[in-house]
Image (cartoon, grey):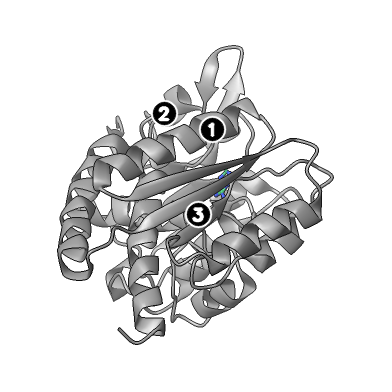
Amino acid sequence: MSAEVLDGKRIAKEIQAEIKQRVATFVETHHFAPALAAVLVGDDPASQVYVRNKERACERAGIKSQLHRMPADSTTDEVLEKVRQLNEDPEVSGILVQLPLPREVDTQVVLDAVSPLKDVDAFHPRNVGLISQGRPQFLPCTPHGIIQMLKRYQIHTQGKNVVIVGRSDIVGKPMALMLANRDIGLGPEMANATVTICHSQTSDLGAVTQQADILIAAIGQPKFITGDMVKLGAVVVDVGINRTDDGLVGDVDYNDVVPVASYVTPVPGGVGPLTVTMLLENTLSAAGLQLAAVGS
Ligand code: GUN
């Protein structure tokens, strides 16, 4: 077997073209463009790249973008003040606080302060709760992007064993909640999975990952998933972006897994472009939610 590559770049382009159309219709109807405000604290080089990619993607889709840079020695209160200003600003549809924040800033306190109606990352406890209950207001960008990619390749999750390696609040946990639900708004065929979450304390990890029809790697360790951990014919989704001496490397040992899997995502060009794309989707829907909230 030699796995087919899941081309995230192509799918992202396709979805971005659809979003661009919907943004144009929104602007025609409401006479303003949705706007995304990104808050970038400090000068982490990877974060600078991510934020620039997001700005460019917004521009292509007709979404306004603002970048609010803050110095690395900002206090929690200073970042909170910025978030509160953006919450109150009627010109801002969505707020994204780029992570990681500097260690001195209390990340949880800052993320909890983002208005749930502008929470395009879906990190606010209210939004996490709504996802858990199967009635989401926003879907978190990376898990949503993964489901969109699988859907467009007609890889359904219903009735499948999905094993997620990694239990982060950004990917692992929301991914599990979305796939275990009956329908998260993307059709029952893209939910209803039997989900297992693995982590650093999982015993005999390889035996668990071997059960996966769909294996999602979101651990943050380069080439962690090797061919012997993958069932023949499984679909392997690599969420990792690790900067190593060999350049960007995923959490999956790509060359080792290709002969075993039926489909695999590359790094770069797999999940990454979809994360940015779903951020655009959420910014557009945030603009709509705020209109609905003021009753216009
Ligand atoms: N840093 C890495 N991934 C993410 C993400 O999805 N959202 C935000 N805000 N920061 C990140």
Number of other residues with Cα within 10 Å of mark 1, as a class: few under 14, some 14 to 19, many 20 or more: many
Residue 198: x percent and y percent?
64, 54
Residue 92: x percent and y percent?
45, 60
Give the quarter of the image for residue 266: top left
User: Which residue bears the numbered disc 1?
Assistant: 241
Q: How far apart, in angstroms, are the residues tagged by discs 3 and 2?
A: 26 Å
- Residue 286, placed above or below residue 227: below
Q: How far apart, in angstroms, are the residues tagged by discs 2 and 1?
A: 8 Å
Image quarter where the C terminus lies is bottom left
**In the rendered structure, which disc, 3 or 1, sits on the residue that comes first in sequence?**
3
Left or right side of 212 for 110 = right
- Residue 114, placed above or below residue 7: below
Callout 2 secondary element:
loop
Residue type at mark 1 is: Ile
Residue at the spot 66% in from the left edge and 61% down from the top edge: 111
Residue at the spot 23% in from the left edge and 37% down from the top edge: 10
Residue 200: x percent and y percent?
74, 48
Q: Nearer the viewer, residue 258 or 182?
A: 182
User: Which residue bears the numbered disc 2?
Assistant: 268
**In the rendered structure, which disc, 3 or 2, sits on the residue that comes first in sequence?**
3
Q: How far apart, in angstroms, are the residues tagged by discs 3 and 1?
A: 24 Å
**In the rendered structure, which disc, 2 or 1, sits on the residue that comes first in sequence?**
1
Residue type at mark 3 is: Gln
Task: Check whether the beta carbons of the residues at disc 2 and disc 1 lie within 8 A of each other.
Answer: yes
User: Which residue bears the numbered disc 3?
Assistant: 211
